[in-house]
Image (cartoon, rainbow, N blue to C red):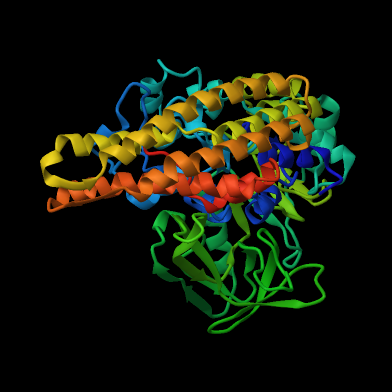
Amino acid sequence: MADNKELELAWEFVNNTNRSIFLTGKAGTGKTTFLHRLKMDCLKRLVVVAPTGVAAINAKGVTIHSFFQMPFGPILPDTDLNASKSFNRKFNKTKIDIIRSMDLLVIDEISMVRADLLDGIDRTLRRFKDRNKVFGGVQVLMIGDLQQLSPVIKESEWHLLKPFYKNGFFFSSHAYQECNAVTIELKHIYRQDNPTFINILNEIRNNVLSEASAAELNKRYIPDFTPEPDAGYISLTTHNNKAEATNITELNKIDGQNRFYQAKVEGKFPEYAYPNNEALELKVGAQVMFVKNDSSPEKRYFNGKIGKVIHLDQDEVIVHCPDDEFSIVTKPEVWENINYTVDKETKAISENKIGSYTQMPLRLAWSITIHKSQGLTFEKAIIDAQGAFAHGQTYVALSRCKSLEGLVLKSKIHSRQIISDANVITFNKNAEANEPDEAVLELSQKNFQLDLIVEMFDFYPFLYPANRILDIYYKNRGSIEGQVETPLLTVKTAITNFLKVSTGFNAQLKELSKTEPLPDISDVIQERFKKAVAYFKDQIETHFVTPLKSFGYTTDNKAIDSDLAKAVDLLEELLAAKLLFFNGLTDGFSSKSFLELRAKSKFFSERQT
């Protein structure tokens, strides 16, 4: 990936800044690969969500609606999300912990996310993180291609949303307008390598199909084309019933015994997210498509590979693909449904498997809808785009193909079939004109590192539990015995002093950074940082740790005891996090070390709730 400067720029922005990012790019530019690399190697605590069940399973994430507990109807900016009668908005402690400790939210297939849904995400994150920051201060990585499939909005829903939004796309949401996201477009195409074909696809993508390109493309118009039985062509069509009818007709033409393969569903796996037919009917001679990448080390097949069934057994299907020397012995594959939890030991966000779906990774594939083909790659395809009815359909269909030679058109492509939304074209033009460069990256890195240092010396979250303990004590003095007031007043005075000192230090840091390089590599800032750490460590020991040693109480009232315990736990948790940072960074500031330490700490504040 190192040869691709846009991918590396995106990697730097995600990992070394806190800017929100819209990562886009034509079909086949490696957006999905980037996401998988991020999940493996990112130091930030991240959660992956997607708008549909199938997209979520493919991205190894969860759906937006289930994670954020969103209602399915329109989400109006001026209504209370929690008042939705049709939806349970009560978040459990685990979910709240995940949101509070989240650094990065990845939204895959962002082109299908409606504006009001993105604003709903913003409101939920603000509720549990920082209510004064867009997305609650969480960095958001939005991945997708606006020239592909767009959000589904019913007429009645748009009637309600129209007063608040210019259009239904995510970029017209209030949160997106506010978040100052950078747009990075991946330009290197891995799927196709023919410059003529790439040029045609670009023209279609940008709604400027020239006569010369249309003529070149329409050379592939072969109206009465009938592929050889073993040629491995798949037909792409606009409507689901067309694709289903073709597959059933073709299957029925084959003499011979059919066999059914029943999916095995374990735990929680919602029906709408099934990645394949629950009862899969196959015959020897059937054309099939693999619907998952091979999980074995041999990597014999990938999602979208076409082949023909040559043998059926109870628990395996043997498939032969054109141009392969070998046949593929296909066994059931497992799709996992995951949810997220916070690990009690490491405090990291971890993925948990809550359900699985086991089935042959195959489906009948004489025909498939353009919609279902999004994200797939085909060697040979017959495209029937005559009924193209939605933005991006023609582009999605054509861009599935690896080459112009592997493409057959059932109907000619005219520019009128290339339905592109004017809002998308305008947005893309503006984004292209403002693509970030190294200078923007460096400034964003500097601001990110300064923000991390500010976070490290921020003692404001300590006020809530300290005040809460005193408040409970003063209201219930008669029911509480022990040393509460004196140690807590000492701590509270110390917090107030720390806030003054850190405000002064932050102002000084901001001034220094105007002329200094990144804090990571600035000798001047490092020197000031080390002095600040030494000062705060000493002060914490004297005015925090020592007085808290004399703190203690007893009460017979269970409710008071529970309230006090909660506040004391939070105070101790925040103190442990601060000491972890101060002890771990005595030799100087490093954003990488800071993120590693933060991933180990449960560093969040409950003052927002």
Q: Nearer the viewer, residue 446 or 5?
A: 446
Across and down, in percent, residue 328 comes to 70, 76
- Where is residue 85? Give x, y as percent: 23, 37
Q: Residue furthest right?
A: 195
Q: Would you identify the image quadrant in which residue 158 lies?
A: top left
Residue under the image location 79 percent in, 50 percent down: 402
Q: Is residue 468 left or right of residue 240?
A: left
Give the answer, above or below, for where 382 lies relative to 522: below
Q: Position of residue 593 (x, y in %)?
A: 66, 48
Q: Is 600 located above or below residue 9 in the figure?
A: below
Residue visible at 75% across and 31% down in the picture: 518
Compared across the picture, whether 309 is left or right of 7 comes to left
* In the rendered image, the vertical position of residue 96 relative to residue 164, given as above or below: below
> Is 201 positioned to the left or the right of 487 in the image?
right
The image quadrant where one finds the C terminus is top left
Residue in the foreground of this view, choosing between 5 and 153: 5
Q: Quadrant of residue 453?
A: top right
The single residue placed furthest to the top in the displayed view is 163
Whether residue 501 can be seen here: yes
